[in-house]
Amino acid sequence: MPKKQIMSTTADDHLAPMTISRRDFLRTGCLAIAGCAVTRPTYRFDAVVSLAAHDAAAGTPVFSSLGAALAAAPMTSARPWRIRITAGRWHEKTVIDKPSIHLIGDDRRASILSFDAAAGQHRPDGEAWGTAGCASLIVSAPDFAASNLTIENTFDYVGEITRPVPTLPPVGGNGAQGVALMLTGNADRSRIDQVDIHGHQDTLCVDAGRSRFSDCTISGSVDFIFGAGQCLIERCVALSRFRPGKERQGYVVAPSTSRDKEFGIVLRDCRLTREPQVPASSVALGRPWRHARKFTDGNYGDPDISSQAAFIDCWMDGHIDAHGWDEMRYPSRDGTRVAYDPLDARLFEYGSRGPGARASSARRVLSADQARRYTAANILAGWNGF
């Protein structure tokens, strides 16, 4: 991996101000209507990422990079290992392969985990990063959590797609994929609260295990929420970004769910918004992704994939196309590329409202009884205490 570089400004406060979540609020057991003061949750931090040695409580080690703080974490822990992220743009490409790591920012918009790799760029060994390797933050261990910070991939996607001649090889399509956060490998029971996740193409990859995103903003253009995992996204903003010169501006989700899983990517009580330049009717809710897999008789689209996604009680701006869903092509066994028709996948909505919530035979609507299946307990089945 490339040598880590850090550009940071450090907060002056020595405590970790937090934005309280609904869950933490209820756990305080002290409601305003009872006349009690509401307090923010406090944490005992195991490490602090800061350039100021004094920027921590006595006895808490301070590290000048997230990578160094993670290196000090135990390989196993009976409780969450909490890392405080102070204000600054921490320019590192990071892999979290230890369980129960919790990242807690001082400031949602000022505590920033950032990198700028694209799929078609080269790793230090000369090979391309690929979509699976380009992410700014890769999580491959269970019980990860993040709150009150920003995770971003700042690769110049717009600059790349508007050049007369692309500079990147077409890895996975165009080489310009720039993942911000990837959940992969042994990742499971991932909990992300009040986090801004920014990118363009392939911003958020939820490819493994169960994950829950609450009160977040996720921005991007092409397939910017994608993967095979069981993912509940609730009370979040899905912000579609502008792609100059493109008639189809993008796709919100691209699930690649296994056929044996009832749920894939579910957005519930979310808002689908857009940058001002994004035209009306230019963005699809999504498209089903059947990625290639190596078999004994060749490399072709995995027949075990039956993509699943649903938008439940979401508000949609006018950038959402009335048709709703697009096809995506994949390599067949005979080497030709064939279309994965959205009607052959499991793509639904229920309770949609706003300018983009338009009736269409291509936009399949769940019945009320079917929609009642989309609970956190069902989507995240087997995850106790989610």
Image: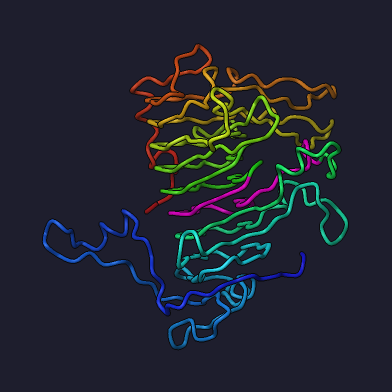
Q: Position of residue 220 (x, y in %)?
A: 59, 41
| Whether residue 315 is situated above or below residue 50 in the rendered picture | above
Q: Residue at x 50, y 86 (%)?
A: 54
Residue nearer the viewer, 242 or 67: 242
Which of the colour schemes (rainbow, by chain, secondary structure, one colour) is used? Answer: rainbow
Q: Position of residue 145 (x, y in %)?
A: 48, 59
On the picture, is 305 further left or further right than 372? right
Q: Residue at x 78, y 30 (%)?
A: 300
On the picture, is 356 further left or further right than 186? left
On the picture, is 257 further left or further right than 177? left
Question: Which quarter of the figure has residue 305?
Answer: top right
Residue 183 painted magenta: yes
Residue nearer the viewer, 243 or 50: 243
Q: Quadrant of the N terminus?
A: bottom right
Total labels drawn: 0
Q: Residue at x 34, y 29 (%)?
A: 372
Q: Residue at x 32, y 55 (%)?
A: 23
Q: Position of residue 90 (x, y in %)?
A: 61, 67
Residue nearer the viewer, 111 or 268: 111
Question: Which quarter of the figure has residue 282?
Answer: top right
Question: Which quarter of the figure has residue 354?
Answer: top left
Which stretch appears magenta? 171-199
Q: Residue furthest bottom?
A: 58
